[in-house]
Image (cartoon, grey):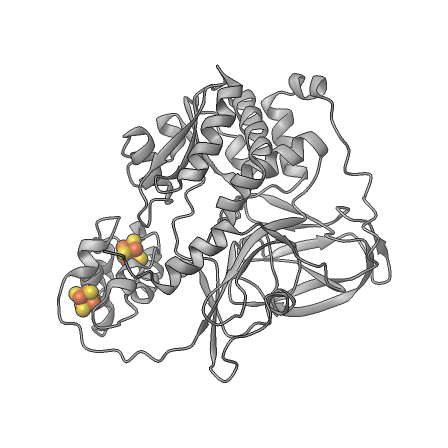
Amino acid sequence: MIKKATHIEDTMRLLGELPTIKAPVPEYLYLATDNARCPKSEIFIKEGDHVNLCQPIGIRHAAFFDQPIHASCSGIFVGYEKHYHRSGKLVNFIKIKNDFKDTMDPFVKERSDEEIAKLTKDEMTEIIKNCASVGLGGSSFPTYIKFQTKAPIKTILINGIECEPYITADKRLMLESPEDLIEGIKLIQQAFGCKDAKICVKKKYHELREVYGELLSRYEGSGITICPVGNFYPQGWEISMIKSATGIDVKTGTLPSAYGIINFNVSTVIGIYYAIKYNLPVYERRISVTGNGIKHPSNFVVRIGTPIKSIIERCGGYKDPEIDKSFILGGPMMGASLPSDDCIITKTVTSVIVLNHKEYKEEPCIRCGSCVLSCPTGLEPISIMETMRSMPVNKEKIKELNPLKCIECGLCTYVCTSKIPVTDYIRRAKVIAKLK
Ligand code: SF4
Ligand code: SF4
């Protein structure tokens, strides 16, 4: 019997098979002065200044770390403008008028293999910090902080799972830049003095397993292996991946490094390689642009700071323009909904999903228990939701129900028979659970 493919399956298969397109660089690029983690910043340039590609032009400050800002084109700093950030907030962006010359800043310089071989972990950490490497799987957590762990590392896990529906940009990256990925893994092995490195991919991605099986046979003795894991969501969540790849249960509230494990997304690993080899900051990234609301879904390499509107134009524009659209930045399960397409690609954006808007009518809870059965962290979403709905909210009960364990995977909303936005209640419960 032939299985009828869903729209999502069709789109993913097609996207995963098509090569990544280099998106045209627009006339103006926009770089956020601040973000959800970094509320303060210092900008080193003034209006009218010329900037080079990859020039450090500012620094964002968070409570416990700093994030340098690099120009993602060469051109003129023309001022500030407010646009939507992935966080859903309107924030200030530095606006640069592209001169289309891509004059590279002297900050970027190649290191020889001999120089790299002598680098210590601390020296690599400093390079990665200056190049503003962050978790490109969507977390945007500064990579240098992970490198600072003092815990002895026995296993490095490379996350190529990309478990949310619709997204295939990492799969294309792994197929198109396998050698860069291996070079990045070798650098992480060098930094942590750890040989065992597993590249985790979905079992069903046979072509990836073939490509890496062949490639790794040329790196005999490297300690790098391919590790097929489940095809389900949320297999890419680090706790679930660690369990599948190593059998270890990471307890809530502990870090994987306490178990001798460190993990990085595949895009982050390649970013680490470019930072150490070329002192190259992340000035572009791969994203999937997809959904039933655009004409030609595609995977792109885009400059950081590109307005989403210009990428949608490159996809042939909107399908069914008479239907209202919903915009999601990130995957459909964990991504952030946006009120419009007036948003900018930042390092955290893994995908842009444009959906033809559908009205769902919320019904009363029928206590089917699907949300409880599907929760990967063992919570009782229905109990949390009911407690949140009863007024006044019983704070002690909320704390007992432990919503802080929630990873906001969105499954409880997805499976809800009554179309209740259960995850939204859990998010609000997390805020209450943090109150003293
Ligand atoms: S979003 Fe829902 S299903 Fe996912 S971890 Fe949180 S409570 Fe559980
Ligand atoms: S899945 Fe929805 S309807 Fe079923 S118990 Fe949970 S909240 Fe109620």
Q: Quick check: 284 above or below 296? A: above
Quarter of the picture for ligand 1? bottom left
Q: Is residue 17 placed above or below 361 in the rendered structure? A: above
Residue at 65% x, 45% y is 282
- Residue 403 in sight from this viewpoint: no
Q: Which quadrant would the N terminus be assigned to in this image?
A: bottom left
Q: Residue at x 64, y 42 (%)?
A: 132
Q: Which of the two residues, 198 or 281, is positioned nearer the viewer here? A: 198
Question: Residue 197: horizontal and vertical position, in percent?
Answer: 45, 25
Residue ID at (53%, 28%):
185
Q: Residue furthest front?
A: 1
Q: Is residue 302 above or below residue 132?
A: below
58 to the left or right of 86: right
Q: Position of residue 436 (x, y in %)?
A: 33, 56
Q: Quadrant of residue 90?
A: bottom right
Q: Quadrant of residue 308?
A: bottom right
Q: Position of residue 302 (x, y in %)?
A: 64, 55
Q: Position of residue 169 (x, y in %)?
A: 52, 50
- Residue furthest out toward the bottom: 322
Compare residues 283 and 213 and report the one nearer the observer: 213
In front of the other: 134 or 205: 205
